[in-house]
Every structure is written in C-alpha cells, then in structure tokens.
Amino acid sequence: MNCQQAETWIVELARDDGAADADALSHLDVCPRCAAQLRAGRAITADLRALAAHDAGASAPAHVAANLLVAFHAQMNDTPHTSAPVGLLEPVRSSWSSLFFSRRACAAFAVAALVLFTFAWLRVRFNAGAVRQTQTAETVAPVRAKEPTAATPNGSEPAAANRSGEVARNASGAEPPVKSPVRADERLLARTQRRPAAMRVRGRERAPELSVGSVGEMTVLAQANAPESVTEFMPLVAGNAPPLASGQLVRVEVSRSALAALGLPVDVTRAGETMKADVLLGEDGQARAIRLVR
Amino acid sequence: MMRASLQHTDEELLRLTLAGDEAAFTSLYRRRQGAIYRFAWQMSGAQSIAEDVTQEVFLALLKEGGQYDATRGTLAAYLYGIARRQVLRRLAKERAFVALADDETDVTAAQLCAPHDPLVDLARRETVETVRQAVLALPAHYREVVVLCELHELSYAETAVALACAVGTVRSRLARGRALLCERLHALRGTPAPVAAVAAKRSCA
C-alpha cells in the first residue's frame, strides 16, 4: 500500500470509525508522513469531540416550545383528525383543490346568473317595442330559368318591383294581418334562383347593425312608396331544402335584435329599433329566405 | 387523547402528531429539538438563528410531515435536512458568518459552576471556542459535513440523506473539511501546521 491509498484510511482511523485495514496499519508503521497525518487527524477529532461535549446541554429556549404548541393547535383545528399512517395523509394541496373548485363553481354560477339576467332584461325591454304582426303577402309565381333578369345599375330594387296591384296594403300596423296572393317579382325570384342566397350584402346597401336581443314578433307593414334598397336574400333553411315552386313574399317588420340569430352584426345601442324585411314563404308556409329592406 | 410513551419510534410519534396527538408532538419535540438547535447553532454561530431555525423545522414538520418517507431515511436525518436548508437560507440572507459575541446570555449551569481545576477548565473553554471559530470559518459545504459527522456523530449514510448527496461526496468533503480545520486551528493557535496535514489538504483540494 502506498501513501495515496493509505490516505483513504487515515480519516477513518483518526475518527476511530470502524475497523482499520491491516495493510494501511502496516504502511503507517513504516511511513512517517502518513503517521504524522494520522496524529494530526486524531488531534482534530479530540478537539471536535470536546466541542460536541461542551455543546451537549444546549437546547432551544422555552418560548420556542410554546410557539410550536400554539401552531400545533392551530394546525389541528384546520385539519381533520385521522389516524392514517404517515405519508398517507392528504397534503395541504387538497384544501387548496377544494377551494379552487369551489371558486370555479362560484365563478361559473355568477357568469350564468349574469347571462340570464341580461337576457331577461333585454327581453323585457325589447318586447315592449317588439313588432306587431300585420301581413302583406305576395305570391311568388313560377319563374322560367331562361328569362333574363336585369339588375338595376346601383344594385337596388326599384320600389315598384316589390309590389303589385294585388298586394294588400295595411295602412296601420295595428290592424290584423291580411294575407293575399301577390304576383312575385320575376326578376327578384330569378336572382334568388341564379345566385344562391348568401350571407352578404350588396354593394353600398349594407345591412344595418343590429343589437343582440330576444326575437320579437314580426309585423308586416304597408309598403311605402319611397324608394327602397334591399339586401340579398339570406336562406333560413338548410341547403337541401326542396326547390321553391311557388310561395309568398311577405313584408314584415322585425326587431333588430331578432336578426342576430341570422348571424348579422348587431349594434347594442339600436337594439330596440325595428326594421323592414321581406320573408319568402314556401308552399308549406315555411320561411325560406329573408332580406332586409332599407 | 392517546398518550405517547417513550417506547414510540420517531415515525410513530410523527404519525400520532399528524393525527392530532399533542402528547406525541411534545415527546417528539423534546426528543429532537436539542440536536436541531445545536446543529443550527454550530452552523451559524448565533443562538438567535438557532432558535428561529428550530421553530421553523418543527413548523415545517407539522405542515409537511405527511410527505416524510421512512424508506428514504430516518426522521432525524429528515429534520437535519430541513434545518440545513433553513440555516443556509438564513446565512445567505445575513451574508456573513456570525461570530460569537462575548455578551451571549446562554451561559449554562456547567459554566457557572466552579471548576475542579480552573486552569484546566479555562484551557478547555479556550480550546472549545477556538475549535468553534475554526468550524465556523469553514466553507458551508464542508462545515455541514463536519458538524453532522463529527459533532453529531451521524453515519455517512444518514449525513448523505440529510444533505441530499451521495455517500462518496460526504466522505470526500469530510476529508477536505478536516484538513482545512487542521490548518485553521494551527493558524489560530499560532503553531505551524503539520506537513502531513498540509499535504493532505493539497492532495484533497
């Protein structure tokens, strides 16, 4: 054994820690350097043991114990007592988990309550201004596909194209709705059939922004003589609906908020207002399409 | 409330404590507080730090004792590990090793008693204080190994658990720490360090 190998044993020998290796002991007998190192190590051990013996009686003062007892009682008051083995008790995390979920539940409840309250408030407010239902009906005649349709230069429908002499007009929206067959505007129908109704607005005639709110009743008003601009027809049924053979074009007045269901942008500040619209009814009375009228 | 007996192991006392047994907590505290206090004192050199660390260790035990895993080591090693972290945190916060003050009020009864031989006792006290200063002058990672292995007589395995390191690391740090301590003591005493001790320090460095 050489000095480097013996060094690993010197600390153990100096600490009297365990049995010494016989080869190390033999080396120490013949190597003065390692022997001196062992003596120095043993002196260090003696000094350290003296320090340990001097400090053996030191302990924490009484107030530490008192503080800990207070903390113990506080801890036990907040934690359910169980006799589960060490390591199986739920950590503080569980109380945080339950607090987290309860907070989520409260937050969800608060959001739901807010939504319901807002909906109810809007419904009460806008039902007062909800449209009355009077009805002016126009019958849509079958259209020949080849018949050309001349679009107006500015894309707007002439006022007269929406009406015929057979349209029953109601001067007042308070009168009960009257439905009478009216010849449909061929150009309008051709346009509808040629171009699938899309959720878009022609040119400058953008659909007005509507506010979100409840759907009110529709009222068909008497058509005014003033020139009007209309949007494209927007489908109200799925694309697989049977082709429209005949039907009725009904002028109605709807609340702006009701049109939010069509996906139109809405203006909250004008939710209480109404606007005109033309609804295309099928033979079965189902509303097939709608366009906005300004 | 179940009364804890002296025959309960540390782990049993901890389990009873976490179940709300005050007597078990008191027994556990009385059994382990001295060692924790002395460790913190010998690491920091300040009894105020030792008091705070002792309190923090047992508070942590109350709060996180459920996480103790008996298969990883003894409860004593677990407590030493908590105390070590608390001490190092305090030392880093205070940024200096706190030297012993002459006006320490922790005079024990043994110190107040008239010694059988005052000169011997004086020599012993001087030696003790010199060694204490030398230990406190060691770098923290050597000091903690020397304190645990030499002053608290923990085994290499228990020390490794407390320090969260390998047994080999404990051995090498202890060897280096002792060499540094030897050199420091001779410097404090004004005596030349043994050549062998210097060589050991150099070989270990």
Image (cartoon, coloured by chain):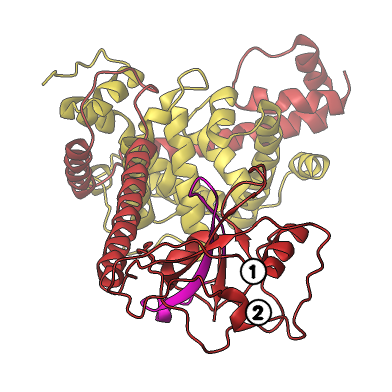
Chain colours: A red, B yellow
Could you say which disc has been placed on residue A157 in the image? 2
Question: What numbered label is drawn on residue B59?
Answer: none
Query: Mark 2 and mark 1: span between their CA atoms?
Result: 10 Å
Q: Quadrant of residue B83?
A: top left
Q: Are marks 2 and 1 on the same chain?
A: yes
Disc 1: which residue: A185
Q: What stretch is highlighted in magenta?
A: A266-290
Question: Residue A264 location, x and y as percent?
Answer: 55, 67
- Residue type at mark 2 is Glu
Residue A71 lies left or right of residue A43; in this view the side is left
> Between disc 2 and disc 1, whose residue precedes?
2
**From this viewpoint, which residue is outermost toward the left?**
B1
Q: How crowded is mark 1: few (under 14 residues within 10 Å), some or many (20 or more)?
A: some
Disc 1 marks a residue whose amino acid type is: Asp
Label 2 with label 1: CB-CB less than 8 Å? yes
> Could you tell whether A220 is left or right of A118 in the image?
right
Image quarter in which the C terminus of chain A is found: bottom right
Q: Residue extending furthest front?
A: A165
Taking the magenta stretch, the answer to whether it contains residue A284 is yes
Residue ID at (32%, 61%): A119
Q: Which of B138 and B5 is in front in this view?
A: B5
Tag 2 secondary structure: loop
Chain designation of label 1: A
Pick whichever, A114 or B172, lies toward us.
A114
* Figure check: B185 above or below B160: below
